[in-house]
Image (spheres, rainbow, N blue to C red):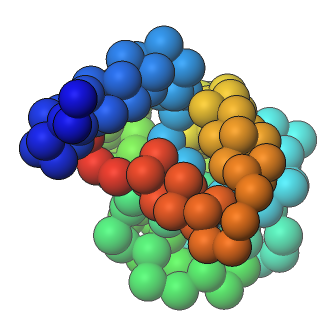
Amino acid sequence: MRIKASVWRVVTVACAGVASLLFVSTGVASADTGPLSVDLTTCPQLSVGSTGPCVTALQQDLQYMGDQNITAVDGVYGPQTQAAVSNFQAGYGMNSTGVADPQTLSTLAQDVQDSQAAQSGPPDPLGEFTNDLCDNIPGGGFADLCKSFWDMPLW
């Protein structure tokens, strides 16, 4: 008995859909490497005129979290950094002073950590399964065809 191509496509897409529901992770991959490794919670209070690695980390973390005031990460606490800190504080119901006090630094550090954890997600077990399955298919070109099947959008 011969199966029509359209029926075969529906069956294979349905099978792939079930497999993806069972195995695919819900994490979101990010190409961004994230903020600097300076722990903001160990930095002193920062304000206009402050410079150094703590200010650089503060600027990068604010930028990482989407603040548009930071146009350059330069390690100098100027008016743009002050505005970004003030906006961040206001967004969290803090007194909007524009000074990066310990509470602000701690809240920002926790916010960045939570964002990174949400973006990293668990590993993709289906990807490893697909590679093992497809790499063991004999014959030239079939492994690529197999992998392209698994990469098809399921709509």
The reply, left or right, for residue 30 in relation to residue 97 is right
> From the viewer's perspective, is residue 19 above or below residue 27?
above
The x, y position of residue 46, in whole percent, is: 69, 57
The reply, left or right, for residue 26 in relation to residue 152 is right
- The answer to which image quadrant residue 154 occupies is top left
- In the picture, the quarter occupied by the C terminus is top left
> From the viewer's perspective, is residue 5 above or below residue 72?
above
In the displayed orientation, state which residue is furthest to the top. Answer: 22
The x, y position of residue 55, in whole percent, is: 71, 67
Frontmost residue, 103 versus 65: 65
> From the viewer's perspective, is residue 149 above or below residue 140?
above
- In the picture, the quarter occupied by the N terminus is top left
The reply, left or right, for residue 91 in relation to residue 89 is left
The x, y position of residue 12, in whole percent, is: 32, 33
- Taking the spot 84% from the left edge, 46% from the top edge, the residue there is 39
Frontmost residue, 144 versus 28: 144
- The answer to which image quadrant residue 3 occupies is top left
- Taking the spot 46% from the left edge, 21% from the top edge, the residue there is 19
Would residue 20 be visible to someone looking at this image?
A: yes
